[in-house]
Amino acid sequence: MRRLKVAHLYQESGIRFSEPKAAQLHIHHTIRGLQEAGHDVTLLALQGRQVLCTEDLQVFRADGLPGRQYAALGVTGSAWFRGFESGVRRLQTTFHLPYLALFDSYRMAEAASIHLTGFDLIHERFNLLALGGAWASRRLGIPFVLEVNADLLEQRKFKGIPESGLRRLYAAWATRACFQSAAKIICISTGLLEHLRRKWKIEEKKLAVLPCAADVAAFAPNEYSAAVRQDLGLTTEPVVMWVGGYFPWHDLGLLLESFAQVLRQRPNAKLVLVGDGPTRPAVEHQVLSAGLQSAVIMTGAIRHDRMPAMLSIADVAVVPSAPVPASGGGTGTPLKLFEYMAAGKGIVATAVSQTADVIRDGENGLLVQAGDVHAFAAAVLTLLNDSMVRTRLGETARRDAVDHYSWEQYSRRLEAIYRDALGNES
């Protein structure tokens, strides 16, 4: 494929790219993979009332970038525009008017229009109310590729914070406008593709499925476990590990209930929960209520470059997903699944969403039905008690990750989507 100039956009004002969250990790690996494949990729991202504009991956490792990595702005950078914007925002706050992100969208579109002359296409990670990429692609006359990881209107409803009134109407209109503007829409799962096709009436030829991937070199099985165990106050205890954000689509209630059953047979086992998020207080309360505080270790969020070492202590890695379809606000296959596979771990997962397409029960992991506490506990015990089965499944999972789910493979599939968006001219 010829060398492309690609702009990767993300319109979310409060994002910190150095945080170890799924969106940041996904954007980082997408850009890095394309750059390693020989393409020129520039990140444009909203940062308050500035627009980050950089090719430097250092942004994913440290905050506080030099000013030269921010886009020069035209109208949206002028004193009168900023004053007008501040006045409108004050009125919105005073009178509780809905925030529609129009200033943000216009700022993103302007920055892109100024800085993306000569680019081949725009790739944007979809965010609710974000119209900057769609507007910029129209101004520049270049294809717009939209990456969608969930129906965000449905997801907000599932989280218990549904849109309403004018903002709901505007969000639906903006979502539809983005979908219509896109030359290609990348879906994280087959379930999401089917949902977008049915609900939003998107023609199937515009849709493509591209699941997550893993850094198979960084997550190769390693010998870090002794030091990590010592840091967590562990010695030789068997370890069950979960990694991720504390969100309602991760069924940590199921995990805690099943682990209580595991402890009846393996009383020295430890459950290590790695991550942070909005449902963490509820999980902490459940741990205390069940009397599991001596058996559960909650590390909080850690830097992603520490994850391979952290996973090295896991005997069993788990994916307890709630049965939430894309139409109900669910997402696709979690990033952690592929990292577990790359690390060669024995995996227990609930058979929901695309996880059931990736994990073949008894071959590269164990699958159980969503919500089945007893079956989940039994599967975890199977792997804790049989090191030969655990090793066999882990080795197969590692091979699958290398052969099918590396970021290199992801980049090749993404290039094919770009070729389609460009009319196969590349």
Image (cartoon, helix red, strand yellow):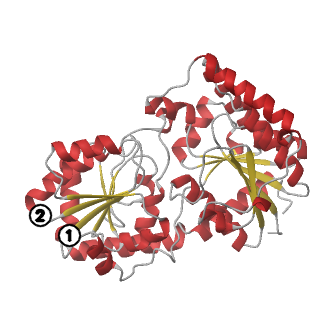
Q: How far across and how far down the image is residue 308, in percent?
A: 42, 72
> Upstream in the sequence, badge 2 or badge 1?
1
- Residue at the (36%, 49%) spot, across then down: 351
Q: Is residue 1 left or right of residue 218?
A: right
Q: Quadrant of the C terminus?
A: bottom right
- Determine whether 99 is above or below 191 in the image: above
Of residues 289 and 191, the one nearer the viewer is 289
Q: Are marks 2 and 1 in contact (CB under 8 Å)?
A: yes
Question: How crowded is the residue under tag 1: few (<14 C-alpha within 10 Å), some, or many (20+)?
Answer: some
Secondary structure found at label 2: loop
Tell me the kind of residue under disc 2.
Arg
Observer able to see residue 290: yes
User: Which mark is on residue 266?
Assistant: 2
Secondary structure found at label 1: loop
Q: How far across and how far down the image is residue 349, in percent?
A: 33, 55
Q: Is residue 211 left or right of residue 239?
A: right
Q: How far across and how far down the image is residue 301, in percent?
A: 42, 57
Tell me the kind of residue under disc 1.
Pro
- Residue at the (24%, 67%) spot, across then down: 239
- Residue at the (39%, 74%) spot, across then down: 309
- Determine whether 24 is above or below 163 in the image: below
Q: How far across and how far down the image is residue 15, in percent?
A: 60, 49
Dividing the picture into quadrants, the one containing residue 247 is: top left
Number of numbered tags placed on the structure image? 2
Dividing the picture into quadrants, the one containing residue 416 is: bottom right
- Determine whether 375 is above or below 39 in the image: above
**Measured Cα–Cα span from mark 2 to mark 1:** 8 Å
Q: Which residue is mark 1?
A: 238
Q: Quadrant of the N terminus?
A: bottom right
Observer able to see residue 344: no
